Amino acid sequence: MSGVWVFKQNGVVQLVESPGSDCFQGSGRRKVLVHVPTNEVVTSYGVLERILSSLGWERYYDDLDLLQFHKRSTVHLISLPKDFNKLKSMHMFDLVVKNRNMFEVRDM
């Protein structure tokens, strides 16, 4: 992972990948989320929800446009787009940060 974290005016942090990184050189490589203990690639929200549930995350049903998960022992909230095909690397890295040593983002 190469790039720069940029703070936008609305307070949101976004990873802007370096021009020299693979995604800008047309390599066609995409990122996948991997559950480290099982080495399983997360291929759907069903798989992800099963893993998050086993880690103590609970699903929120308040917002119809997002999938949201909360862990009672933390202040963290995971918000994901409703459509799994719209899951981007920034969402994957959010999962990695909030679940240390449980997930990795890898190039496919």
Image: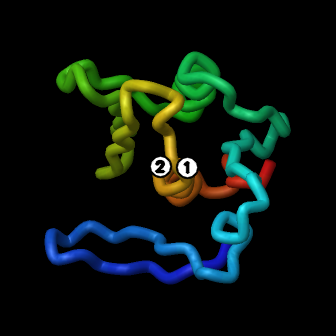
Residue 90 horizontal/vertical position (percent):
48, 56
Q: Are marks 1 and 2 in contact (CB under 8 Å)?
A: yes
Q: Dot 2 lies on which element?
A: helix
Residue extending farthest to the right is 39
Residue at the (60%, 81%) spot, across then down: 19
**Disc number placed over residue 91 in the picture, else none:** 2
The image position of residue 78, as x and y in percent, is 38, 43
Rendering quarter of residue 14: bottom left
- Quadrant where the N terminus sits is bottom right
Q: Type of residue at label 2? A: His
Q: Which mark is residue 80?
A: none
Q: Residue at x 30, y 79 (%)?
A: 7
Q: Badge 1: how crowded within 10 Å, few (<14), some, or many (20+)?
A: some
Looking at the picture, tell me which residue is in the foreground, 20 or 40. Answer: 20
Residue at 53% in and 30% down: 85
User: Horizontal placement of 11 versus 22: left or right?
Assistant: left
Report the Cα–Cα distance between label 1 and label 2: 4 Å
- Quick one: 35 or 43, which is closer to the camera? 43
Where disc 1 sits, the SS reads: helix
State the mark number for residue 92.
1
Left or right relative to 87: residue 37: right
Q: Residues within 10 Å of mark 2 (few under 14, many from 20)?
A: some
* In the image, residue 20 above or below residue 47: below
